[in-house]
Amino acid sequence: MNLETLTRSSGEWLRGTGPESDIVISTRIRLARNLAAFPFTNRASAHQKGEIEAILRDRISKLDIHPKLIYVNIPGLSPLDRQLLVERQLISRELAAAEGPRGVALGPQETVSLMVNEEDHLRLQVMRSGLALDEAWQDIDKVDDLIEQRVTYAFSEEFGYLTACPTNVGTGMRASVMLHLPALVLTKQIEKVFRALQKINLAVRGLYGEGSRASGDFYQISNQVTLGKSETTILNEIREVIPQIINYERQARAVLVQGNRQALQDKVWRAFGTLRNATIMTSEETMDLLSSVRLGINLGLLEDLSIPTVNELFINTQPAHLQKLMGTELDGEERNAARARYLRTRLREIGAQPN
Amino acid sequence: MKCQYCSNPATVHLTDIVNKQKRELHLCQECAEKHQLIQQHQLNLPAILHAMIGQYVGAMSDELARLACPACGMRYMEFRAEGRLGCPHDYNVFRVGLGPLLERIHRASRHVGKVPRHRVDVGRQVELVELRQKLRRAIEAEAYEEAAQVRDLIRQKEATG
């Protein structure tokens, strides 16, 4: 695998399969871990970061994981390639923007990514398509066990896994489920859902994590608390609440269809028509229109277009992906023209028609 | 009620209770966003953390402000400014200041859950961080003979850990 091959697929999280995949996009779990003998990344000298990276890189290369993980040296990547990994959710924006020795080990299916010298020395991440908290936890727990046999993690009986930020200490675990909630947004009930989630200490974030806007009506629900609750308890709390949100979204969809089918159909077809005909498209507008199209497909208002295809359009119209596909660096205006051209061509190739 | 930062009407009210002490923040939307206490739909935890650290260090007098970690050199005031700790040992050194914070963030103060099978005791962890910092200083001072000695000592300690 190299980075060029990444743009030829949508990656695990946009595969569009898995349980409840009309609403649940993906499940992701990450664990924050640090080596016991070193200062945290922000406090480590360049030399120490080099040592930390060398140790972790060596231990990761020896892990009994098949197929083998591929280690990517981040400083050796162009800004465009870093952005590509961010868009695919394989590395964090922080890791892309940081300085000094750092890297990421990736599984060929893009389900596993191990970030080295992020805010913590090691950030393990496992991603699964659809709602798959148990599977994701089993995977990441196993990888964590394998690494733990080869390094000594910073850990105390009292505070658990010790992390650079006290918001992660304890289990170091953040489990998140990404949902597509267009009907709750359209019916203006989304705020209510957020308030309810906050009351039970679950956080809601946009597509690209902390502080990012919920573009394309994608929302990530994750645990806020990492101390004082076991991994199992935390996962159960999320597991319990997700079906309720799915239910609300389904109800809202039913209301939209029953209440004013024609208006909804109009919205979906207009979105589709714009995507198929426009000559200038921003990333933001594309996300919003694709969200409507995705909803339309799930409600049977659009045929000849599949969810995996829409997912592919979602990822390939992101700035770095688009530039990779076009084989050249483009400025903002050029990107908007190239994005529109790409969408027109792809949608005509597929021959998708409004239903 | 007026915003504590400007005099616009306060629409955001944040309350927390730690050790039976209640603290309140009353802000207008604009100031809350400006100070990143709320962000769109979510409470911004790192920003709240930042504000909380500020409040506690005031309440806990100079004692906390003078604290520094012997292993990594981090001072509590730096933690307050950056919101990030310097090394694993800071959890012990800043215990007094961290306790209420952890309680506020997690509503708990003790770990429950996974435990690594392979552990070294806390004392040994601190010692290793200290040695690593000593190594760093030796390298920076180009005292390579000392660096080599410290490195050997680290290897020895790690092997017996």
Image (spheres, helix red, strand yellow):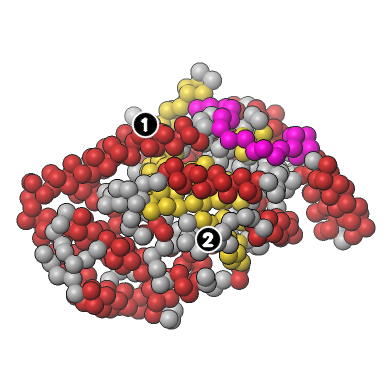
Any magenta on residue B114?
yes
Q: Residue at x 35, y 79 (%)?
A: A334
Quick one: quadrant of the C terminus of chain B?
top right
* Marks 1 and 2 belong to one chain: yes
Could you say which quadrant of the image residue A221 lies in?
top left
Q: Is residue A286 visible to us here?
A: yes
Task: Identify the magenta region.
Answer: B104-125
Q: Which mark is residue A199?
A: 1
In this view of the protein, which residue sits in the foreground, A72 or A119?
A72
Any magenta on residue B149?
no
The residue wearing badge 2 is: A107
Is A293 drawn above or below residue A197 in the view shown?
A: below
Q: Is residue A340 visible to us here?
A: no
Near mark 1 (Cα within 10 A), the count class, few <14, some 14-19 or many ≥20, is few
In this view of the protein, which residue sits in the foreground, B161 or B101?
B161
In this view of the protein, which residue sits in the foreground, A240 or B132?
A240
Callout 2 secondary element: loop
